[in-house]
Amino acid sequence: MVGVGITLAYNASGLTVPAGGIKLSRASYCGILNGSITNWNNASISADNGRQIALNLPIKVVRRSDSSGSTFVVTSHLNTACKPAATPGIPAANVWNRGVGTTVSWPSTFIGATGGGGVASAIATTPGAIGYVDSATRLANNLPAALLRNKAGNYTAPSTDAITDALLGGTVVKYGTNPTNRLIRIDNLNDPTRPNAYPISTATYFLFYDIYSDATIINGIKTLNTLALGSAADTFLTSLGYAPLPAPIKTVSTGVVNTCVNTVLGPSPCN
C-alpha cells in the first residue's frame, strides 16, 4: 500500500554535523549496530564525513525492546549488507552475525525502548544517541537521520524519492502458483541496487479476508484501496514521511484488489 524507510535517527547534541547531515558508510553503520563502533570519533565515521565529526562522544544505540517489524527489516538488511560478499573489505568486527528477526540479541550496552515512539523519545533525550525508527516516526519527532551509503556507493537520505526508488527495484511476486492467487509481496529489498535507493526500505501491506459476502463491505475495501493508491493520496503520504508506491507496483496492487472484489461480487469466491 505504501513505502517506508527505516532510518538511523540521531541526537546531534555535542556533535559537529557537516552540512547536509551525518554520512555513514556501510562499514560504519554495520559497526555501530553490531556494537563494534562505540564512539563518534571512530576513524571510519570520521572518514565518511571528511573528518568534520571527530568528537570524543560515546555512541548510545537505541533499539526496540519489543517484537517489531522495524527490527525485522533492519536485521534483514544488516544480514545482507554487512557481509564481505555485499561489502568487500568490511572489518571482521563489523560483520553482522546476530541473525534476522522481530527480536534479536543486541549488545547489552544498547538502550532498549518500547515502540517506535519510545525509541524516538530516547534518542531525543540522549546526547550521542542513534537508533532505528521508521521514516514517519522520525519526521513526527523532528529527528535528523543519517545519510546511508547504498549498494551503488551513493549516500542517500530517507527521502520519499529514495524510498520509492528502492521499491522500484523490488520484484513483485505472488505466493503460490495458482493464477487466481491474490496474495502478493515485494522481494529483493534487503539491499536495493538502484543508484538512488535508500538502503533500508520496505512496504506496508493491506490484508483483508476473501470471504466477505456483504457488497457494502466489499465495495468499501475497493474504495479504500482506490483512495490509498490514488494520486491524491501521494502528497498526504509524503507529508507524513511515507513514500507512494512506484506506478508499476500501484498497478499490480490495484488490479489484485479490484479483480478479487469483482470475483467475490460474482459467482465465484476469491482465492
Image (cartoon, rainbow, N blue to C red):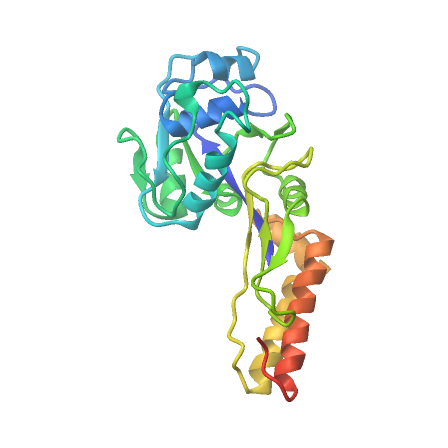
- Frontmost residue, 266 versus 229: 266
Q: Which residue is found at the position 62% from the left and 49% from the top?
A: 243
Vertically, is 186 above or below 145?
Answer: below
The spot of residue 182 in percent (x, y) is 60, 68
The spot of residue 160 in percent (x, y) is 64, 43
Q: Quadrant of the N terminus?
A: bottom right
The spot of residue 235 in percent (x, y) is 67, 53
Q: Quadrant of the C terminus?
A: bottom right
Vertically, is 173 above or below 51?
Answer: below
Q: Which residue is found at the position 41% from the left and 46% from the top?
A: 116
Vertically, is 266 above or below 202?
Answer: below
Q: Quadrant of residue 254?
A: bottom right
Name the residue furthest bottom: 267
Can residue 14 be seen? no
Is 33 left or right of 5, judged from the image as shown?
left
Can residue 134 be seen? yes
Q: Count up the numbered dots.
A: 0
Name the residue furthest left: 108
Q: Which residue is found at the position 69% from the left and 68% from the top?
A: 255
Q: Which residue is found at the position 69% from the left and 33% from the top?
A: 195
The spot of residue 232 in percent (x, y) is 70, 60
Vertically, is 177 above or below 102?
Answer: below
